[in-house]
Amino acid sequence: MRKTLTAFLCLIAFTAACKKEEPAQKPPEGALAQVNGVYIMQADMDNVIAAQTPQGQKYSKTIFGQESLLDVLVREQLLLANAQSNNIDENPVYQKTIDDMQRDFDARLADAKKYNLIKILKETLRQDGTIAVSQKEIDDYYKKYKYEITIRQMVISNAQDAATVLKELRAVSGSKEAKFIELAKKYSVDPQADLDKGQVYTFIPGEYLPEIENAAANSPVNSIQGFIKTKRGFHIIYKVGEKGITKKDAQDRIVKIIENQKLDKYLAGLSDKYKVEVYKDYED
């Protein structure tokens, strides 16, 4: 009996010794640290460094910078492990924050998908000739329109205010430009204008609204025209100037004009194909 007990105790001691001598699990290649079973990898540090400013990257690539950054990553993982063990992910504030972020991400992703689908479709239409623009078309367009016009503009939301502004402008003796800027700050709802700086619009025919282009082309410099109703509102314009433009400066702009004209025709056909129905009429 004594011999059997002694042999059993020796077996236990031997087994325990074997367990103690088992080598620890080797960390994966590129591991810099481990917190609660989660490895912090060199790739994690590289990703953080890549997002830094050039000056920050310069420091983070030094021994001191990498040591400091690793300490930050370890501290971050400690906090994360503690948050997880305390079920912070069930906190209503946390859940609402993440839900809001997810909705924002989904919306931006949907916009990105639409943008890129349309971008690639347009490129396809250029390649197959549907909206492609030839050099002859550019040359012919330039022969007709070798000039650009500069105007100031205010867009007013109702006819009554437009009439009031136009009457006040026409009552001004001498230069009307300063008064135009003053009234634009008060009345204009033009979303594109920088009203504090009295922003001007410069265009060659085809780049802007036809009604405004015609009014500006057929009026002298320093004159007021208005009010002109378009789909955007009631316009009053002040013609700042008109000058010639070289083909070199006009070429890219002409390409966009002709391309948009062709795209409009293409879309008109799509409206029939896909049966567009507009239910809201915004006319007064």
Image (spheres, grey):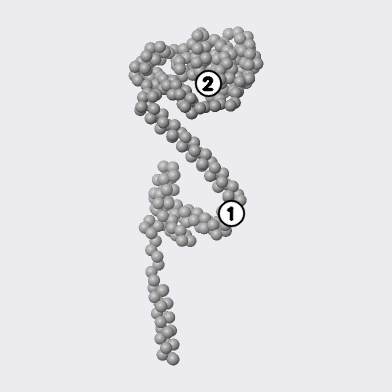
Left/right of residue 250 with respect to residue 240 in the rendered view: left
Where does the N terminus fall, quadrant-wise? bottom left
Q: Toward which corner of the image does residue 263 lie, by quadrant?
A: top left
Residue to which mark 2 is pinned: 199
Residue furthest to the bottom in view is: 1
Label 2 crowd (10 A; few <14 / some 14-19 / many >=20)? some
Left/right of residue 192 with respect to residue 49 in the rendered view: right
- Tell me the tag on residue 90: 1
Q: Is residue 173 above or below residue 190?
A: above
Identify which residue, 10 or 196, lies in the foreground.
10
At which x and y percent is residue 275?
51, 27
Q: Of label 2 and label 1, which has the lower sequence position? A: 1
Q: Toward which corner of the image does residue 189 lie, by quadrant?
A: top right
- Residue under the image location 65 percent in, 14 percent down: 164
- Residue under the image location 43 percent in, 84 percent down: 9
At which x and y percent is residue 229?
57, 16
Spatial CA distance of label 2 from label 1 is 52 Å
Q: Is residue 88 above or below residue 197?
A: below
- Residue under the image location 50 percent in, 18 percent down: 209
At which x and y percent is residue 174?
58, 8
Q: What amino acid is labelled 1 in the image? A: Glu
- Tell me the tag on residue 52: none
Q: How many marks?
A: 2
Q: What amino acid is labelled 2 in the image? A: Gln
- Element class at badge 1: helix
Identify which residue, 6 or 47, lies in the foreground.
6
